[in-house]
Amino acid sequence: MSLATRNGTGPVEAPVNPPKVVRQRRMRPGLLGLAVLLIALGGLGAAFAVTSVRATGTYLAVARPVEVGRQVSADDLVPVQVAGGQGLAPVAAGRLDEVVGKRAAVSLTPGTLLTMAQLTDDPLLGPGQQQVALGLDPAEVPARQLHPGDKVLLVSTPDDDANGSAASAGTRFPATVIDTSTSDTDDEVVVYLALAVRDVPAVVALNAQERIAVVLTGAA
């Protein structure tokens, strides 16, 4: 007991209130697990952001058109910075010396990133071959899309004025697709072919007369 005085009179016994005990709240296990999960996710997000920044690099892009089969020069390319790059396989700018001198396996379009799959060291024309280009209507192309390396057969179509000449009897010329492109002015599809030298004059003449049909015989 403690003593207290009131107005100068004698001591008066008075009870002392006991101290309040603050009861600590217990965190539920579910909330604790959620907090740990949020902290972990935050750490992963930060790590992903750092990784993305580190993935930024300088790569080679195509600066001007390069036709299929032509050797690539340093002037055809330009270094560009690309952030991220997941799922891509661009050529690093530091590998310029490895790229210059290789041939374009496909047509290189300005503004696109360069990949090694677009280049080759092999000659696109074999011994005794020359390259020809055929302009075809979309309905005359034997597949939705032709790819380099596809095997095709060029077949001459009948000529009403030939009266049974050899060229009108379905003469066949085997060829290999080098590349394709679509005209900007119309829907014409240009197919670039590797053809035996001996067949070039006849195919050129038949193409000028619009008497060539293209048949796909083997996909690359």
Image: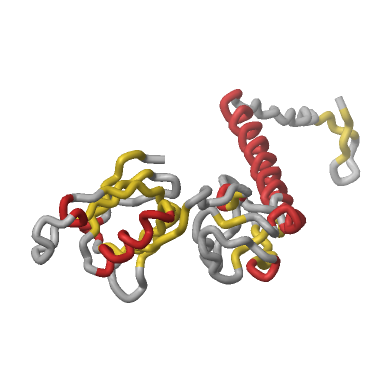
For the N terminus, the image quarter is top right
Q: Nearer the viewer, residue 41 or 80?
A: 80
Image check: 160 left or right of 67? left
Query: In the image, what residue occupies the spot 59% across and 52% down?
Result: 119
Query: In the image, what residue occupies the spot 63% across and 49% down?
Result: 121
For the C terminus, the image quarter is top left
Q: Position of residue 29 (x, y in %)?
A: 60, 23
Q: Nearer the viewer, residue 116 or 175?
A: 175
Q: Position of residue 120 (x, y in %)?
A: 60, 49
Scheme of colours in the image: secondary structure
Q: Is residue 94 above or below residue 26?
A: below
Q: Nearer the viewer, residue 48 or 58?
A: 58
How many labels were placed on the picture? 0
Image check: 32 left or right of 112? right
Query: In the image, what residue occupies the spot 34% across and 51% down?
Result: 145
Q: Position of residue 116 (x, y in %)?
A: 62, 49
Residue 137 seen in the figure: yes
Q: Is residue 76 above or below residue 216?
A: below
Image check: 12 left or right of 147? right
Q: Nearer the viewer, residue 193 or 51?
A: 193
Q: Position of residue 53 (x, y in %)?
A: 71, 53
Q: Is residue 18 above or below residue 173?
A: above
Query: In the image, what residue occupies the spot 65% across and 26% down?
Result: 26
Residue 157 seen in the figure: no
